[in-house]
């Protein structure tokens, strides 16, 4: 049974993350595996902690940048040096949620065409 509140979409992008609960400001390269209106799943070599909150700037498929906060809620070791992370968006604007919703609709439409 699917427990997610929103459909997940695949997206390749680069993310800059600044941790909010410390004074650390580091750029972290990630590989986005999926994104939804409520969260993000990605691979990363850096060690991120569950419960840590990061200020993120996510460059999306249109070239626009979504600026929000992500709360790390899941960490899973992978076979290589990367780990899979799941995060929930906090404080995302309605306009940014709408951009993701438009992308969801586009993906569904393009898959029906195949």
Image (tube, rainbow, N blue to C red):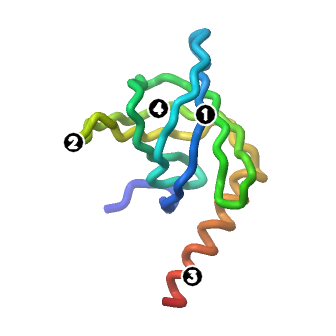
Of all residues, the one furthest to the right in this rendering is 95
Q: Position of residue 93 (x, y in %)?
A: 75, 44
Residues at marks 2 and 3 touching, judged by CB atoms closer than 8 Å: no
Q: Residues within 10 Å of mark 1 (few under 14, many from 20)?
A: some
Q: Residues within 10 Å of mark 4 (few under 14, many from 20)?
A: many
Q: Which residue is mark 3?
A: 110
Q: Which residue is mark 1?
A: 16
Residue at (48% x, 40% y) in the render: 30
Q: Position of residue 10 (x, y in %)?
A: 49, 60
Mark 2 residue element:
loop
Residue at (58% x, 13% y) in the render: 24
Task: Judge depth for marks 4 and 2 and give the one in front.
Answer: 2
Distance of label 1 from label 2 (alpha carbons):
24 Å
Of all residues, the one furthest to the top in this rendering is 23
Residues at marks 3 and 4 touching, judged by CB atoms closer than 8 Å: no
Choose top left, top right, bottom left or bottom right for residue 104.
bottom right
Distance of label 1 from label 4 (alpha carbons):
14 Å
Position of 17 with respect to 79 (left or right) is right
Q: Earlier in the sequence, mark 1 or mark 2?
A: 1
Q: Which residue is mark 4?
A: 72
Distance of label 3 from label 4 (alpha carbons):
31 Å
Q: Residues within 10 Å of mark 3 (few under 14, many from 20)?
A: few
Q: Pick the residue in front: 45 or 72.
A: 45
Q: Pick the residue in front: 21 or 10.
A: 10
Distance of label 3 from label 1 (alpha carbons):
29 Å
Position of 65 with respect to 111 (left or right) is right
Distance of label 2 from label 3 (alpha carbons):
32 Å
């Amino acid at each position: 049974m699917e427990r997610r509140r929103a459909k997940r979409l695949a997206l390749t992008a680069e993310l800059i993350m600044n941790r909010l609960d410390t004074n650390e400001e580091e750029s972290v390269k990630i590989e986005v595996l999926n994104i939804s209106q409520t969260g993000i799943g990605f691979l990363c070599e850096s060690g991120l902690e569950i419960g840590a909150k990061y200020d993120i700037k996510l460059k999306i498929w249109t070239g626009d940048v979504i600026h929000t906060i992500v709360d790390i809620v899941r960490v899973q070791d992978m076979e290589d040096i990367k780990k899979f992370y799941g995060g929930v968006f906090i404080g995302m604007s309605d306009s940014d949620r709408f951009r993701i919703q438009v992308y969801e609709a586009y993906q569904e439409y393009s898959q029906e065409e195949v």
